[in-house]
Amino acid sequence: MAQDYEALDPLFGDLVHRANFQSDEDARQLENALSAELKTVIRDTDATQSKRMNALMFLRIQKDPEFLDVVLDLFDDPDQHLWHVIHPSKSMLQDSRLRQKYMEKLDGPDLKNSGEAAVALAIAGEVCLFPRFADWLDNGDEPHRNVAIEALRLLNAAESLAVLQQFWDEGKGDEDTRLSVAGALFDSGDPRGRDFLETIALQAKGLASVAAATSVYVAGRCREIPVGPHRQDGLKLMLHILNDGDLEAKQGMVNQIWNFERLPHAFTADGRDEAVVWVGSQLESPPG
């Protein structure tokens, strides 16, 4: 029998709401600022992270010609999270200076920085890194394996997809790793791990089931896959977890749906019911 629902730690919810409120307030104060003022805020290491991030967002919206130079400076900033949230466009990644910055972070000791750099370079199509990512998948520790799976998917090259397919077909990796590989393959249009994802999701136990259901939903939401399920199959798995999952799975699913939709009561006792209503509305709406 599924456990009764209990909200995640209300202190966490309060922290999230306060952070969102502060970010909204910072955005309100900066939305009409001139580019010179925005650059001053971004370069002010005593300013809050929220304020600097909002200034970055508005400077990018303004298409300021010095935006890339500002970004390059952030790679040496004490707050390394700032360059993590840039999500560079492909045109930005054509700049050799930016690619070099990512290369330097890729080789650095900080695993989070290395992971962010790997993803950006994969988006940039740095196929020269293919051997490194393949080695991380086969021989790396868990953080490097996870980065490798995402980077190989984003490289979007026949060789990288073949490495993931071979890894899957040879039965390599523990359940968590195989879950990530199945999701990456499925998102690339390869359904060979689809049954595995559904099996884990239907177990409705723990965060693994949430990840599996989300992989099906995201792949179906982002593209039509002729040999795979529609986004609604993912939604049905999500609804199953919300109704019949263990407590960890239910909480994880509510939190995941909050990531998609920012439901206002996600961190309260009403979070599960609100998530159920949201999934129901998505099931009734046409894809698009």
Image (spheres, rainbow, N blue to C red):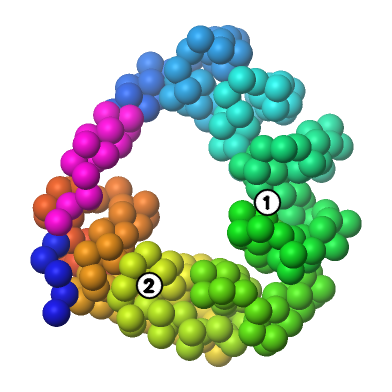
* Residue 166: quarter of image: bottom right
Q: Which residue type carries mark 1?
A: Val
Taking the image as shown, residue 199 lies to the left or right of residue 245, namely right
Q: Nearer the viewer, residue 253 or 175?
A: 175
Q: Nearer the viewer, residue 268 or 145?
A: 145
Q: Which callout, 2 or 1, points to the residue nearer the camera?
A: 2
The amino acid marked with disc number 2 is Ser
Q: Position of residue 17 (x, y in %)?
A: 26, 35
Q: Position of residue 4 (x, y in %)?
A: 11, 66
Q: Residue 104's x, y, as percent?
A: 80, 36
Residue nearest the observer in this picture, 132 or 39: 132
Asked whether, in this view, residue 245 is left or right of residue 111, the answer is left
Q: Quadrant of the C terminus?
A: bottom left
SS type, badge 2:
helix
The answer to whether 30 is drawn above or below residue 175 in the figure is: above
Residue beneath the point at 61% across and 59% down: 142
* Figure quadrant of the N terminus: bottom left
Residue 50 lies left or right of residue 127; in this view the side is left
Part of the protein shown in magenta:
6-20
Q: Is residue 99 above or below residue 203?
A: above
Question: Residue under circle 2?
Answer: 209
Dominant secondary-structure state across the stretch colored magenta: helix
Pointer 1 residue? 119
Say whether residue 37 is visible: yes
Q: Secondary structure at mark 1?
A: helix
